[in-house]
Image (tube, rainbow, N blue to C red):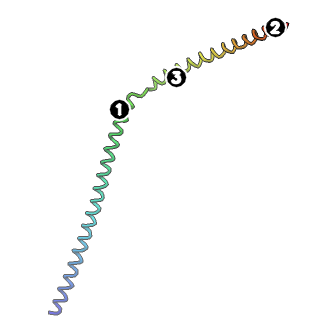
Amino acid sequence: MDKWSLAFQVLQFLITGVIGFYVHLVTKDKVTNDKIRAIQETQTRVNEEHGSRLSRLESEIGGAPTHEHLSDVYEKINEVAVCVSRLKGEMEGMNRTLSLIHETMMEDRRS
């Protein structure tokens, strides 16, 4: 009986070890799967937030000026720049004329 008792205890120890190892593997897989599931849920939430943000941005961009609109604005700005340049030249001429008139009047007073 002593031999059989020892053999039974060794067998029981080995079976317990195998069951323990199996439980360890199953638990490890469950924890890994739980972590993966949590990451997927977080990623899904983030994707939904980004989707709504993108939709909102796309709808707001619809009212933005196009290249054609901007080219029209640039054309108008260039026209205004030409007019301002012309007015600057005219003002310089008027300034010079006024200076000459003022100079002539001052010479007339001295004489």
Q: Nearer the viewer, mark 3 or mark 2?
A: 2
Residue at the spot 25% in from the left edge and 63% down from the top edge: 30
Using a 10 Å C-alpha cutoff, classify the residue at mark 3 as few (fewer than 14 neighbours), some (14 to 19) or many (20 or more): few
Image quadrant of residue 28?
A: bottom left
Q: Amino acid at mark 3?
A: Tyr
- Please provide percent x and percent y for residue 80: 56, 18
Residue at the spot 29% in from the left edge and 52% down from the top edge: 41
Q: Secondary structure at mark 2?
A: helix
Q: Using residue 74 as the reference point, say whether residue 62 is left or right of it.
A: left
Q: Residue 59 got which mark?
A: 1
Using a 10 Å C-alpha cutoff, classify the residue at mark 2 as few (fewer than 14 neighbours), some (14 to 19) or many (20 or more): few
Q: Nearer the N terminus, badge 3 or badge 2?
A: 3
Q: Residue 109 got which mark?
A: 2
Work out which residue is located at the far bottom of the displayed protein and give it. 2
Quarter containing the N terminus: bottom left
Which residue is disc 3 drawn over? 74
Q: Using residue 35 as the reference point, say whether residue 83 is left or right of it.
A: right
Total labels drawn: 3
Q: Amino acid at mark 2?
A: Arg
Q: Nearer the N terminus, badge 2 or badge 1?
A: 1
Image quadrant of residue 15?
A: bottom left
Q: Nearer the N terminus, badge 3 or badge 1?
A: 1
Q: Secondary structure at mark 1?
A: helix
- Please provide percent x and percent y for residue 108: 81, 6
Residue at the spot 34% in from the left edge and 36% down from the top edge: 55
Q: CA distance from mark 3 to mark 1?
A: 26 Å
- Please provide percent x and percent y for residue 106: 80, 10
